[in-house]
Image: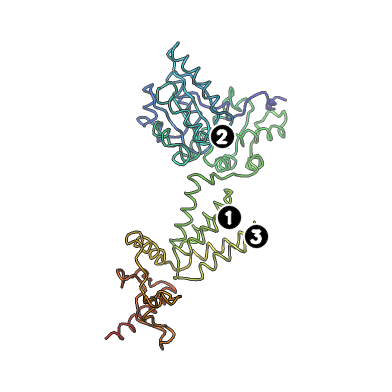
Amino acid sequence: MANQLPLREQSPLAERLRPERLDDFFGQHHLLGPGKFLHSLVSSGSIPSLIFWGPPGTGKTSLAKIIARRIGGHFVFFSAVLSGVKEIREIVATARERLATSKQQTVLFVDEIHRFNKSQQDAFLPHVENGVLKLLGATTENPSFQVIAPLLSRCRVIVLEPLQDEDLLKIFRRALTDSEKGLGKHNLDLTDEAEALLVELADGDARRGLTILEVAATLTLQQHGDQDTAAVLTAEIIAEAAQKKTLRYDKRGEEHFNLISALHKSLRDSDPDGALYWFYRMIEGGEDPLYISRRLTRFAAEDIGLADPQALVQANAGRSAFQALGPPEGLLALAQVVVYLATAPKSNAVYAAANEATALIAKTGSLPVPMHIRNATTGLMKQLGYGKGYRYAHDDKDALVSQTHLPEELAGRILYRPTNRGYEALVKDRLEKWRTILKSREQ
């Protein structure tokens, strides 16, 4: 059948279409546009060691190969998943020999460099330092979390961004028209709806989009048979080929911190819509709901406090409900907590008071407890004045007594300053009333 794709003898479409020159590379305009940093660097023919940091399918490996070719280096692909220190030693020995005999530098591309542990990363250091190796690393996770500082200081970090829609469209259209490396010889068309869906499902990842496109092409050609007309890829076929969209998310790296920060700030700014969106972005990305629940509990104490004492109760109740029900039903309980916290009055007065108290203790040290509020548990302690002068609050008609509870050096110091928001306004009024009563008794 003329339209059938060859079976298994060819590499994946994404690999076949990998660009070999900068002119064929789509995306990363902030790095590769005329006059931009990486474009100028590669054009000069000399580069430092680099670490490419960006989401999957944004061109990290392709750029490394293009750079190695442009500077005339010998390209060696090294997988942090499959290789270790032994292989590094072998590569270094060969690189030294090549440099001595042919003056050609070895460009070592380390895929998923974040998967190396500290000792494995240490093994690169002397060889990067003395120039035996030109290191090009690739990582989807923030290098500042995953790459050791000495190695990081010897490399320039290049940040790649998710591909823009127009760049993805160029890649997909090239795949459909390129007869040598792509699908051009199969006479395929893509409807506007299918094209838009493919871009959406790719989510900035060219490899993901090309994989979906290749599967969709196979399904379409199987249905189309030997007809002379073009085989049309529909949105339904694209959706079938994709099965399920996987969101970009790394539970231990930067995107984890980005999303929890977005959730926290949406809650603080009293935006339930933003808070719900980021909550479910984390859930759909595979985050542990109990981690989010712990952060919601912290938020209730840190950003709401006594402005709404029920916030902490709601946060704990939501956690208990999730633990009892599990997903997916239990997620609704956490979503309820998200909305409650977002719409509750806000106060960080308790949080600020806690920070001020710890800072004060760090500054003043172990000041002694005032004698009148010490407990005289023995006769000797009573003789020494422990508890002397203590006034029992319940003996007063207002349950108020005028006595200090801070060390003498800090007498009169105020740490907790309630706001006028929510329930905390009542607390503020109450404290002011008590202080007025006590002050009047001193006159």
**Distance from the alpha carbon under mark 3 to that under mark 2:** 34 Å
For residue 345, above or below residue 394: above
Residue 288: give x, y in percent of width and height: 58, 52
Location of mark 1 (residue): 289
Location of mark 2 (residue): 207
Residues at discs 3 and 2 in contact (Cβ within 8 Å): no
Element carrying mark 1: helix
Residue farthest bottom in this picture:
397
Query: Disc 3 marks which amino acid?
Result: Glu
**Distance from the alpha carbon under mark 2 to that under mark 1:** 29 Å
Residues at discs 2 and 1 in contact (Cβ within 8 Å): no
Query: Disc 1 marks which amino acid?
Result: Pro
N-terminal-most mark, 3 or 1: 1
- Image-quadrant location for residue 362: bottom left
Residue 239: give x, y in percent of width and height: 64, 43
Query: Disc 2 marks which amino acid?
Result: Arg
Rate crowding at label 2 as few (under 14), some (14 to 19) or many (20 or more) other CA atoms within 10 Å: many
Element carrying mark 2: helix
Which residue: 47% across, 64% down? 301
For residue 109, above or below residue 205: above
- In depth, the one of 416 and 264 nearer the eye is 416
Location of mark 3 (residue): 329
- In depth, the one of 407 and 113 nearer the eye is 407
Q: Which mark is residue 111?
A: none
Residue 415: give x, y in percent of width and height: 35, 68
- In depth, the one of 418 and 345 nearer the eye is 418
